[in-house]
Every structure is written in structure tokens, then in C-alpha cells.
Amino acid sequence: MQVKFAYFGHSRLQQTRGGQVLSLAPNLAREPVAFDAPLVQPLRFREAISALHDVVISDLRYKPRDKTAYQQWKLEEHRRLAHVHQEAYRESRDEILARRADVPRDLEEQYNRCRHKYWNARQKYADYLRRHDMELWRMLMPCDPITTIADDVVFFECFSADESSYGCLTVERQAMFGASTDFRRGTTNVDYSWALYDHFQQLRTYRETRFRVDPQGFEVAVAGQADYREEKIDLPAGWLRGLMQVQAAMTLPMRRVTLSREAVYSLLAWLKRHKARRSPRALRFELAPGEPPRIVVKPWEQAIVAHGVYYEGPGGAPIRTWGRQRLLVLARLLPLVERVDVYLLGSGLPSFWVAQMGDMRLTLGLSGWTANDWTRGAALDLLSPPVQLSPGLVAGVAGAMQTERAAPLADSRLAAVASPAECAAALNYLARTGQVIFDLDAGVYRWRQIMPAALGEADLGPEPAELVASREVIRRGEVRLVSREELGDGAELILGKYGTQPLSLTIDADGRMKRAKCSCSHFRRGGLRKGPCRHLLALRDLASGAGSQRDTLDDWFRRWQQWAAN
């Protein structure tokens, strides 16, 4: 999807007579947004916003070793010789042109040809970086963060390069900012660069700092002025869908586990000092009502107990989460953290870590696996409401939220539109289309549009065909679970049938498909290299319980309430 940004000037840190001003340039292609207030605690804000930056650039996907040193040397030699030839050619050309006073007749043609060649090369280079060096690509073409000015908070959102980590820094207006001289609530993108990140590091307590989302551009910037610029960014395939899925996941009921700062420090220190050589590389949450939460780090079976806090939710089987290395972005915040609230959907499903810092909080959302990002979570989609909502109902709930800006599910305006079950389903849909975000800590839904208009399937890009087909296979009951067998070291063999055809699937200790067998054409053509077929996806979901049939919206909402009460 191609997204348009328009800015007047750049975000920057300006020195003034009495201190400095941190001025953010908003996206002029969106609704006008303004905020101007002194920053009361600049050091705390600096550390929190820097941690959010680490989420933006994080990319923990597997990267093979680079074995191209010799080829690189040969390429440099080729470039050196080409440079010598070009210099000789340039000297000869300049000598010839010096003898000619007339301008070539095809000068404009040459210019257009060279310009076309340049832009083609630039696009190819950008595509290459996006595939091979995502961090450098982000430096050249950042996806600008989303900033929302609300009545009670200001919050900043971002999504990681590998589409597996979501970050949201929420700042309380009354505590972190002084009186605002210019306030206009709304959501916008802000011009962001690595230079601005460096400016954040210059925030100090001995200099007064004002935080400003500069509204000047909306009033004076017009096309043609020196500081006005427009940018069109092609978002990577699946990036926008992944961001929407994390919004929808936050509206689902989860178990909340409170961890002390000491427990989080112990966990991060262990992960920093040890590297797992074998699977499983998981965190296992062992939760007993009235007892301190216990986290077991696999494969060492190292137990970390959160002393001083107690789990108040229901008991049950342990919950496993993966992708734990992404938690290291919280290390910089430990001096500020009072506690960390962890919200768990279930084993192998997304988790949310909310670092409580008094007047600030950082929400870190993690997909089930780093390589199994939000866009591939079939089990997550199966937890969504089981009904197709009418456009009138969705529009009514959206209108109420746009008026209220922030409201809990039990709000009277929402109750006047539809039943609680319908409101919960509609809010989940609005989150999935980028119009609403759920504040886990405050327990309220907030009106916040990712784009100026609601996003549809055409904007988000199509889901994988086999993933869509697997839901239909489950709905029709075409796949049956026959047996399950433990293989040792946490691996499991799952046997099933599609009609009369046998299915087999081996899942390792990290929950990944290692070996499989199916007679369909998709599997015969590519095996697991091109992703599992619809029958294997359906078998996996049936084995995990995610593919269980849901009856009605009321049944879904009843389970939602049971989880929410805990």
C-alpha cells in the first residue's frame, strides 16, 4: 500500500533564549493536530522515547552468515578500475567539449534519459535494502511514527521492521507536561529521522524544554514553498495488516500477570548472559492463584519468581510465549520501571508487556514468534467475534466513539447504540480497521485513526490463500484429529485425516512445523517451503484447540466476560 506524507520543514530541537524547543512536524495530509507545552521531566521522557525507538529498528529474524568477502573485494577492484577508466574518459570528454561552444541538440533528451536511469536504480537499491538490510532501509525510508493528542494523554505508536513487535508510549499530560498554550486533539504522523533520535539524547534537566507538535504547517505550507515536501512510502506487504492485527488482539480478553522490577531485571540479565543452543527457546508462565508468578526460561529450566507480588487470576496449564529476545528493549527503562504488567492470550499467541513508569507507560506487544508474525496468526483470527456485523451497527459504534474519544465498554453512549456483545464485536472490528485502540492499563477504548479513513481488505492486502481456506476447512469439519504422540524433547507427532487421506504433522518444542505429510497439490509442489497447506493448518489448529467451533456472538461474549473478570 502506498501512503502519502506531506510535511512543512523537519522535526528538530531548537535552541531558544530561555531553553530549547522539541518541535515535531506533523503530517499535513491528515487532520490538523497541535500541542505545545513545557516538558516537566525531560530525562524520563528521553529514556522512554529512546526505548520506543529500539522497537522501531528491532529485527531479530534469522540472518545467514555473510560469505561474500572475496566477491566484495573483486567488486571493489572492478570499481577501482572502472573509476580509472571513467577519469580518463572524463578528461578526454572535457577536452573535446572545451573545443565546442554549441549546446547539444538532444540535451533535454539526454537529461530525461539519465533521470529515468537514476530513479530506476534508486528504486532497485531501496528494494534490495528492504530484502537484505532492513535497518539501513529504515534509516533511508522510515515509516513515520503515529502520534495521538488526547484530552488526558499523549501517545506514540510504532511497529518493528520484522513486523513482530509493537510499541506504544503513553504519557500523562497533567504530570509530564505543563499548561498547553495550543491544543488540538487528533492523530497524525510526525516527521522522524535518526537525527531526531540524536536530538532526544540531548534533553537535560538544567535546560527548559518545550514539546510541540507544530501546527504552523497547516496554515502556511503550500506546494512550491522551500520547506514543503511530499513523500510517498510503499509499506512492505503485510506491515499494515500486522499493525491492525495487534490492535485487534489488544481488545481480546487476556490474563494479567504482574511482575516486579527485580523479576524483570533477573529475566533480562539471564537472557543477556546466556544463548540457547537448542530448542525450546520459550518462557513458561506457571500461575497459581494467590502465589507469586513463576517464569521458567527454557531450555535451561531456570525459574524466576516475582517475589512481593501475587497472581490474582485463575489457575490452569502453563502458558508458553516465544520471541523473548525482543524483551531486551525494556532494559533501558529498568531505572524508571515500577512494575511490569504482562497480558497473556495463551500459549503461542501474542503477549503484551506494559512497563509502568508512574506518569508514563510503554506497551510492548510481541507476536507468538519473531518469524511467525501477526500477519500469519491463524489462531489469533479464530479468537475474533464469530459474526458478520452490519454496516449500520459499526457506523453507530464508530460515531459514538468519535464523539466520546475515550470510553469503556460499559459507556452509556455505546449502550444506547447496541448490546454489550455487539459493541465488543464492533470495537474489535474498528480496531482491526485502524480506527480504535484499546488502552490496556486504563481499560478504555480510544478513537485513533491510523489512516485518514477506515482501512478495508484492499488496503491491508490479501491474506494468504491457504490460511483463508483453512478456516473454511475447519468450519465444514473436513479435517479430523486422529491421535497425538509425544516424541521427546517437547516435540509432538499429530495424526489426522482429510476425508480418507492421511495427514501427519511433527511440531517441535518451539511450536514450529518441522515435518509434515499431505496428499494435496499445494504440499506436493512445495512441501513446507512455501508454507503449510490448508489441511495442515487446520490440523494444527484443531490440535491446539484454536479450531474449536464457536456457536453464537453471545457464547463468544460470555467467554469474553469470564476472561475479563479474571
Image (cartoon, rainbow, N blue to C red):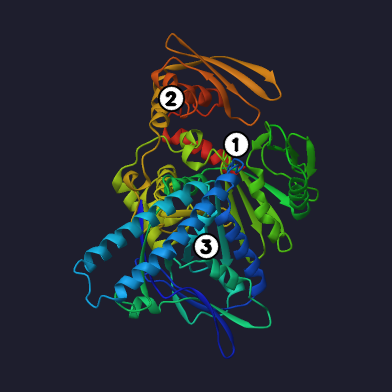
Q: Which mark is residue 534?
A: 2
Q: CA distance from mark 2 to mark 3?
A: 38 Å
Which marked residue is nearer to the observer: mark 2 or mark 3?
A: 2
Q: CA distance from mark 2 to mark 1?
A: 23 Å
N-terminal of the pair, mark 1 or mark 3, is 3
Q: Is residue 160 visible?
A: no
334 displayed left or right of 240: right
378 displayed left or right of 297: left
Residue 228 in the image, given as x and y percentages of width and height: 36, 74
Give residue 223's quadrant in the image. bottom left
* SS class, disc 3: strand
Crowding at dot 2, Cα within 10 Å, few <14 / some 14-19 / many 20+, comes out as many
N-terminal of the pair, mark 2 or mark 3, is 3
User: Which amino acid does the dot numbered 1 rest on?
Assistant: Gly
User: Which amino acid does the dot numbered 2 rest on?
Assistant: Arg
* SS class, disc 2: helix
Q: Is residue 140 visible?
A: yes
Crowding at dot 3, Cα within 10 Å, few <14 / some 14-19 / many 20+, comes out as many
Which marked residue is nearer to the observer: mark 1 or mark 3?
A: 3
Q: CA distance from mark 1 to mark 3?
A: 27 Å
* Above or below 554: residue 152: below
128 or 139: nearer the eye?
128
Which residue does the numbered mark 1 point to in the structure image?
346
* SS class, disc 1: loop
Total marks placed: 3
Residue 188 in the image, given as x and y percentages of width and height: 42, 65
User: Which amino acid does the dot numbered 3 rest on?
Assistant: Phe
Q: Residue at x 23, y 68 (%)?
A: 107
* Above or below 563: residue 519: above
Residue furthest out toward the top: 500
8 displayed left or right of 480: left
Q: Which mark is residue 156?
A: 3
